[in-house]
Image (cartoon, rainbow, N blue to C red):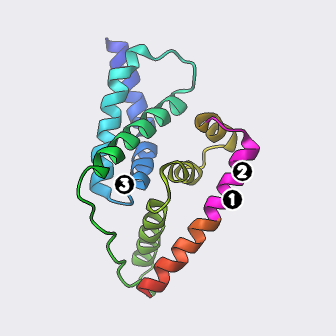
Amino acid sequence: MDKLNHTFENLHNQYFSMVLHLCRGFMKGDRELAHDLAQDVFINVWNALPGYRAEASYKTWIYRITVNTCLLQIRKEKNKIKVPLETATHIIETDTAAHTQENENILYRAIGQLDEVDRLMMMMVLDEIEYEEIARIMGVTENNLRVKIHRIKTKLKTLIEDERRRTG
């Protein structure tokens, strides 16, 4: 059991920020929900760790657990009353930190408007996961993945421009 605890601690330390980032994308930028969801992911990792068969890297395995946990949460949220996306606050050009934070918020809101699969792909791209690994996780060819990502980026660009027009 000591080895299991040590392995879990190492996985948590190594992958928590990646999981949190992915959860934040699924939760449309909501930091608190993403943090709660990331904790749920690691509860699932802990529960599944004794059955880990090393058929994929720990990173890929944790990505799959994260995606499944996020999709389950999204399904639960669909059964709740929907709250419309909040209107973005005005971007403050003089404050770089505020500007960067607002750009990040706009990006996450735009990603949040994508369908679940597109959202997942973009979060992996933002995490700088190799296309080969993303294709393996998604179960598509690398060429197919590249086409999909190009289309998603084009759609995201439009969503971001629309969001900026609304807030600008």
106 is higher (above) or lower (below) than 73: below
The span shown in magenta is 139-153
| Near-viewer residue (22 or 157) | 157
Residue at the image position 69 percent from the left and 59 percent from the top: 150
Q: Name the residue carrying label 1.
A: 150
- Marks 3/2 in contact by CB < 8 Å: the verdict is no
Q: Name the residue carrying label 3.
A: 27
Residue type highlighted by circle 1: His
Magenta segment: does it hold 150? yes
Q: Earlier in the sequence, mark 3 or mark 2?
A: 3
Is 76 placed left or right of 11 in the picture? left
Q: Estimate the spatial distance between the alpha carbons at disc 1 and disc 2, rounded to whole Å.
A: 6 Å
Seen from this angle, which residue lies furthest right?
143
Helix, strand or loop for disc 1: helix
Magenta segment: does it hold 50? no
Give coordinates of residue 85: x percent, y percent: 34, 69
Please identify the dominant SS of the magenta region: helix
Residue at the image position 54 percent from the left and 78 percent from the top: 161
